[in-house]
Image (tube, grey):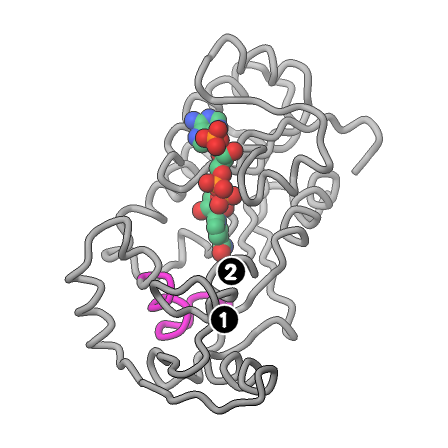
Amino acid sequence: MEENSRVLVIGASGRLGYHLAQYSLQFGSLDDEKSLIEAVKQVDVVICSIPSKQALDQKLLIKVIKESGCIKKFIPSEFGVDPDKIQIAELDNQFYSRKAEIRRLIEAEGIPYTYICCNLFMSYLLPWLAQPGLKSPPRDKVTIFGDGNTKAVFVKDVDVAACAISAIDDPRTLNKTLYLRPPGNACSMNQLVAMWEDKIGKKLEKIYVQEEELLQRIKESSYPENMEMIFIYSAFVKGSYVL
Ligand SMILES: NC(=O)c1ccc[n+]([C@@H]2O[C@H](COP(=O)([O-])OP(=O)(O)OC[C@H]3O[C@@H](n4cnc5c(N)ncnc54)[C@H](OP(=O)(O)O)[C@@H]3O)[C@@H](O)[C@H]2O)c1
């Protein structure tokens, strides 16, 4: 980051925002327009990491950024799959359409941006081996979705934050989408399970859940509880997290 870049992070106490905040000095909230105007005036870069559910709250921020005229880069809250390319839009409870709507507004207002598409955070799904309802990896039986061979890219949360910060002053990222997909970080469920079996020195019983059954389970469960299965479907059946 150039010495003179002053960064405002919105969502600084969150999973990703915590890491972003390590690099930044100003933290803001979207709740109050007056204090938002004051906060934006003091910086030249704004990074937002609020939850997807609140994505449309960024409309006020975009208005303030536009009016301030002083922001050289806005990184909106995305940090997943490219919302313009996702294939599960009809299933995802507007998770990605809200992010796409924010993209269109940023572009319409002519605000300089970088969109960060980082695939899956390592802190999400991996710690419980993508087993819905579990908090740690299983030790007896494991459910494999699809044939287990579809790969997804996993990136450490702190590396996502570091890349977002590096993008601030990199002219190649201006008004572009930055995809984080280190080839060595792509892993299928079969590979993940094999690594875990190796670690615990034990073979697990495999239960295969095919696409139709997973879709049925998603339809039978309600929002937001079904989001985890939707991400599993998107990642390990549709292969959306290798972009
Ligand atoms: N690729 C992946 O695997 C992955 C995984 C998780 C998240 N993500 C994405 O990463 C982004 C950030 O998610 P996260 O999990 O880091 O979020 P999080 O942990 O839920 O944190 C959200 C942060 O936003 C703040 N916040 C919420 N509403 C706000 C508002 N109206 N004004 C100001 N601050 C507000 C929260 O503050 P309070 O706590 O005070 O409300 C908190 O600091 C989202 O776009 C999400 O979709 C990606």
Read off the residue under disc 1: 152
Tell me if label 2 and label 1 are in contact, CB under 8 Å.
Answer: yes
Give the image quarter of residue 59.
Answer: top left
Residue name at image x 58 percent, y 47 percent? 176
Residue name at image x 55 percent, y 29 percent? 10
Q: Is residue 35 above or below residue 210?
A: above
Residue stretch in magenta:
230-243
Which residue ends up furthest to the top in the rendered image?
34
Q: Is residue 112 above or below residue 164?
A: above
Give the image quarter of residue 88.
Answer: bottom left
Specify whether residue 188 is painted magenta.
Answer: no
**Camera sees residue 77:** no
Front residue of 161/183: it is: 161
The answer to whether 46 appears left or right of 61 in the picture is right
Front residue of 14/96: it is: 14
Read off the residue under disc 2: 120
Specify whether residue 241 is painted magenta.
Answer: yes
Residue name at image x 24 percent, y 72 percent? 214
Mark 2 C-beta to ligand 1 under 8 Å? yes
Front residue of 75/110: it is: 75
